[in-house]
């Protein structure tokens, strides 16, 4: 009888042990919808003491100041007079802000569906100057959107919650995988952990290659998923819509160079003649495979990064494009990359962000044979601005980094502002 019981007891013990070993916990992001009434948005702008950087957004350099976006929450104002020791000055709360630009001490930003102009002359007490209402119906940040419903006069946005789930699997089975991004409706998406200056001397600052706002003369240009919008800002207290140009779909970024506008999209690079700032005219489109596509320009060369993912399935690469003939741009050469994001070019040095893969610098003096100078892998890199031959600004999911770029083969960290 004892011999018959031993195998049964052994099987029970093995089964209990296997169940214990196969208990797993997975972490996933849940996007929970919430509604904001328009009256709340109207009353939401304020200035407060400095706050921690929690979800870094776009970056912008203006005079001695550095502006760092806090996604959909506001803008951190940093005094960068001493790049070795940047000082937090204030935090400007702007509901829904994703993009912004500055000219002559006036900050232009989106506040969900509205365009607002703010007096930045005293960053300790920023005041609203003007507002152009209901200009935008939708905003996108890294695949996450908000929507304005004119019927209810409210915005539907999404807040991220990190959740954990403990579950059991049969012994020997593989982990079925993480849950991914959940938008509260049963739809699952892949879970990723993870310069726009105006004409020189016109009083505007400098943004990164991921910008959707840019300035030229007395005009502000913004791009949505489908449109190029033109605003007359000759009177900052009354920014006025001057026109809208439908570009199709998948529009991502805008970069001004001299009197031209270069617009990155999922399917190509648009080039617009801006000699008449009130009415930009399309010159051509340089098509490429579907991908995320920021662009920067220097001289007769355009530098474009293509990234696979939610934007498309194009190979990850850097493209160098000859734009000597703006009506007939041509591809010079493509270089394979890991996961290219924003980029910046200064003289013959190209800085390129690769998300979780870090930051790279290249010598691009020779189009057919660019040379990698350095690869920093110790932090996330989303976008970059080369302010000069000595100062390099980098923003990523884990915070802000500032480098001495005097020797692009040996970047020296000057300072950082870590995400809290």
Image (tube, rainbow, N blue to C red):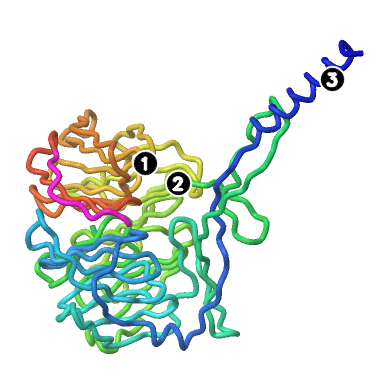
Question: What residue occupies the far top of the structure in this picture?
Answer: 3
* Callout 1 crowding tier (Cα within 10 Å): few <14, some 14–19, many ≥20: many
Residue at image location 60% in from the left, 85% down from the top: 151
Taking the image as drawn, is residue 283 in sight? no
Cα distance, mark 1 to mark 3?
Answer: 51 Å
Nearest to the eye among marks 2 and 3: give it: 3
Judging from the image, what secondary structure is the residue with disc 2 in?
A: loop
Cα distance, mark 1 to mark 2?
Answer: 9 Å
Position of 220 with respect to 225 (left or right) is left
Q: The C terminus is located in which quarter?
A: bottom left
Residue at image location 42% in from the left, 47% down from the top: 194
Tag 1 residue: 356
User: Which numbered tag is attached to residue 8?
Assistant: 3
Judging from the image, what secondary structure is the residue with disc 3 in?
A: helix
Cα distance, mark 2 to mark 3?
Answer: 46 Å
Position of 259 with respect to 225 (left or right) is left
In the rendered image, residue 351, in percent from the top left (x then y), is placed at: 22, 43
Taking the image as drawn, is residue 127 in sight? yes
User: Which numbered tag is attached to residue 193?
Assistant: 2
Q: Nearer the viewer, residue 220 or 139?
A: 139
Label 2 close to label 3 by CB (< 8 Å):
no
Q: Start and end of the magenta stretch? A: 411-420
Label 1 close to label 2 by CB (< 8 Å):
yes
Q: Quadrant of residue 83?
A: bottom left
In the rendered image, residue 52, in percent from the top left (x then y), is placed at: 29, 63
Position of 256 with respect to 212 (left or right) is left
Q: The N terminus is located in which quarter?
A: top right
């Amino acid at each position: 009888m004892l011999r018959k019981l031993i195998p049964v007891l052994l099987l029970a013990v093995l089964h209990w042990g296997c169940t214990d070993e196969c208990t797993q916990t997975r972490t996933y992001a849940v996007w929970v919808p919430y509604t904001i009434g328009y009256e709340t948005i109207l009353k939401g702008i304020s200035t407060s003491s400095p706050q921690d950087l929690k979800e870094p957004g776009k970056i912008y350099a203006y005079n001695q100041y550095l502006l760092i976006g806090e996604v959909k929450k506001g803008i951190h104002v940093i005094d960068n007079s001493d790049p070795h020791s940047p000082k937090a000055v204030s935090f400007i709360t702007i509901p829904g802000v994703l993009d912004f630009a500055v000219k002559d001490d006036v900050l232009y930003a989106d506040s969900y569906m509205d365009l607002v102009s703010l007096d930045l002359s005293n960053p300790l007490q920023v005041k609203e100057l003007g507002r152009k209402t209901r200009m935008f119906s939708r905003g996108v940040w890294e695949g996450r959107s908000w929507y304005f419903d004119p019927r209810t006069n409210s915005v539907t946005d999404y807040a991220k919650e990190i959740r954990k789930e403990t579950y059991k699997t049969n012994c020997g089975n593989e982990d079925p995988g993480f849950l991914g991004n959940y938008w509260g409706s049963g739809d699952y998406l892949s879970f990723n952990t993870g310069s726009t200056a105006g004409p020189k001397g016109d009083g505007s600052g400098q943004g990164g290659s991921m910008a959707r706002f840019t300035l030229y003369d007395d005009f502000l240009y913004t791009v949505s998923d489908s449109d190029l919008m033109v605003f007359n800002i000759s009177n900052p207290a009354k920014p006025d819509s001057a026109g809208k140009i439908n570009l199709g779909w998948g529009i991502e970024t805008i970069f001004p160079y001299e009197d031209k506008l270069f617009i990155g999209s999922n399917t190509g690079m648009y080039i617009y003649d801006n000699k008449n700032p009130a009415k930009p005219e399309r010159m051509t489109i340089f098509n490429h495979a579907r991908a995320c596509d920021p662009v920067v320009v220097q001289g007769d060369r355009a530098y474009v990064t293509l990234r696979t993912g939610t934007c498309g399935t194009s190979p990850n690469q850097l493209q160098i494009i000859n734009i000597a003939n703006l009506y007939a741009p041509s591809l010079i050469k493509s270089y394979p990359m890991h996961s290219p994001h924003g980029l910046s070019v200064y003289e013959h040095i190209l800085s390129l962000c690769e998300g979780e893969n870090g930051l790279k610098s290249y010598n691009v003096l020779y189009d057919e044979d660019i040379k990698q100078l350095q690869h920093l892998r110790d932090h996330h890199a989303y976008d970059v601005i080369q302010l000069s031959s000595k100062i390099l600004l980098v923003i990523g999911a884990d915070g802000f980094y500032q480098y001495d770029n005097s020797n692009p083969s040996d970047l020296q960290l000057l300072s950082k502002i870590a995400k809290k």
